[in-house]
Image: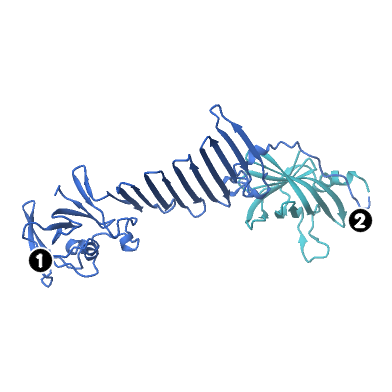
Chain colours: A blue, B cyan
């Protein structure tokens, strides 16, 4: 047999049964995440499925809408209600967006995650004729960091702000509403930083008390027992005398006072705003149109003061 | 020549079925969206003297070249692939092949590839395949096993 001759032969083989069902490839089975070979570009794209439910809800799903196997857009309608969801996955990146409305209220959300980096984020918002809300969540599933904030308000002037952060097992949370009494506790929303997420007043960097400083350094870098710091009176709290020191400019405490338009004054006289800070510290200020006289604690995450007892 | 050449080439040149330990093939898959991955230690098998099976190291996916026209060129076999499929995740995905060439060295000595400085080792395989959708699959290695 002369192998040099052209030996155009028939097929090496022959079709194996084409078992594939296009519906089976919508979930990104040929993407990287599930092992095997990543050949997601070869998965079927394009297709539409429609259905109508017994309550008159109609739903149409178009898959392959973003050119990948997992891309799909679903629209659901029933009367004035309409919802559209778009989702897709490519190369480890997952994205989903959703909007819905019923003629009176609407909401939207967006989610993204990356299986390679671990980063994820989600935002959502909604509104109707009397109020609105928005939430933001982000973090990294691999290093354990997370941040979540929620803001809400209504046409009556009420609002709520909450934030939670997590980092390497440490979780901090702060929440407050519109200035006023809630469950017997007075919340005084920070007029400058109230709408910021946690630690937004500190450019997003979490602040923690330093044990070797008076007030944890919140009011300034005064070393415990330092003789050079100017004393600003004393107050007695729980049968314990607390010496107050002058708040240093550019400290977190100074930023707190400034945002509430408060001016520090020596503790001692009655009828003052007394703010208890970290590590058994306290400073005093004269009340103003934002903050009435009374005792307050500090929520450092949002630089907010919360009444220590009803004032 | 004989149309049976292609069908018998593997049985003729690779001998009886047997196992080839230490799969060391390397596959590179480049997709039109820019995604590119290199898969090491892929297992290369020939089934029924007809199909070329390329299995990922984790065993979860097998790319199958199941139709090709083969020509003997010197001591090498050149096959032009025209059909393939991916057996993965419990399903079989047909892959439309735009063009593809598989070179095999069925002999026991390394062979020079025509018009190149490259050589194919004994039982060596080299494949370049482009799909209709623009995915490129490259493969180098040796046949690990011939199976029924």
Contact check, label 1 and label 2, Cβ < 8 Å: no
A307 sits to left or right of B69 = left
Mark 1 vs mark 2: tell me if same chain: yes
> Disc 1 designates what residue?
A232
Task: Identify which residue is drawn at 80% across, 52% down.
Answer: B106
Q: Chain of mark 2?
A: A
Binning the other alpha carbons within 10 Å of mark 2 as few (below 14), some (14 to 19) or many (20 upward) gives: few
> Disc 2 designates what residue?
A4
The residues bearing labels 1 and 2 have C-alpha atoms spaced at a distance of 103 Å
Find residue B72 and report its horizontal and vertical position in percent: 87, 53
B17 sits to left or right of A200 = right
Find residue A9 and report its horizontal and vertical position in percent: 88, 47
Q: How many marks?
A: 2
Task: Identify which residue is drawn at 45% across, 44% down.
Answer: A107
> Camera-side residue: B106 or A60?
A60
Residue A62: quarter of image: top right
Task: Identify which residue is drawn at 13% across, 55% down.
Answer: A293
Q: Chain of mark 1?
A: A
Question: Can residue A280 be seen here?
Answer: no
Find residue B144 and report its horizontal and vertical position in percent: 71, 48
Describe the element under mark 1 as helix, strand or loop: strand
What numbered label is drawn on residue A142?
none
> Camera-side residue: B34 or A235?
A235
């Amino acid at each position: 047999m002369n192998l040099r001759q052209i030996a155009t032969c028939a097929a090496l083989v022959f079709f194996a049964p084409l078992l594939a069902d296009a519906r089976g490839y919508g979930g990104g089975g040929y993407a990287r995440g599930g092992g095997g070979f990543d050949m997601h570009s070869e998965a079927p794209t394009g297709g539409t499925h429609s259905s109508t439910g017994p309550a008159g809800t109609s739903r149409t799903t178009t898959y392959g809408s973003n050119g990948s196997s997992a891309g799909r857009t679903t629209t659901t309608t029933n009367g004035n209600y309409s919802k559209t969801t778009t989702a897709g996955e490519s190369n480890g990146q997952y994205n989903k967006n959703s909007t819905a409305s019923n003629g009176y209220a609407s909401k939207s959300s967006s989610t993204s995650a990356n299986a390679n980096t671990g980063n994820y984020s989600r935002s959502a918002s909604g509104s109707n004729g009397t109020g609105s809300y928005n939430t933001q969540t982000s973090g990294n599933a691999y290093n354990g960091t997370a941040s979540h904030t929620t803001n809400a308000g209504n046409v009556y002037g009420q609002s709520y702000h909450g934030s939670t952060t997590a980092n390497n097992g440490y979780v901090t949370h702060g929440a407050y509403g519109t200035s006023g009494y809630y469950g017997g506790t007075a919340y005084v929303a920070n007029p400058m930083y109230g709408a910021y997420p946690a630690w937004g007043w500190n450019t997003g960097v979490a602040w923690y008390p330093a044990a070797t400083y008076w007030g944890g350094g919140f009011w300034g870098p005064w070393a415990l027992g330092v003789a050079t710091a100017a004393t600003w009176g004393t107050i007695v709290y729980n049968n314990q005398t607390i010496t107050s020191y002058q708040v240093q400019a550019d400290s977190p405490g100074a930023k707190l006072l400034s945002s509430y338009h408060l001016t520090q004054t020596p503790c001692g006289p009655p009828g003052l705003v007394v703010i208890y800070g970290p590590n058994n510290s306290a400073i005093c200020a004269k009340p103003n149109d934002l903050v009435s006289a009374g005792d307050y604690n500090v929520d450092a995450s949002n630089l907010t003061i919360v009444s220590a007892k009803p004032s | 020549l004989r149309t049976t050449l292609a069908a018998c080439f593997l049985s003729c040149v690779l001998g009886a079925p047997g196992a080839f330990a230490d799969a060391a093939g390397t596959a590179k898959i480049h997709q039109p969206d820019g995604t590119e991955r290199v898969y090491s230690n892929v297992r290369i098998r020939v089934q029924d003297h007809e199909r070329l099976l390329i299995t990922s190291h984790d065993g979860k996916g097998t790319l199958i070249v199941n139709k090709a026209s083969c020509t003997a060129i010197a001591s090498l076999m050149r096959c032009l692939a025209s059909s393939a499929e991916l057996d993965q995740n419990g399903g079989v995905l047909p892959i439309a092949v735009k063009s593809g060439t598989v070179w095999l060295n069925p002999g026991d000595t390394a062979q020079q590839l025509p018009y190149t400085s490259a050589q194919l080792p004994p039982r060596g395989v080299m494949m370049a395949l482009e799909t209709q959708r623009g995915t490129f699959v490259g493969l180098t290695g040796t046949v690990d096993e011939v199976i029924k």
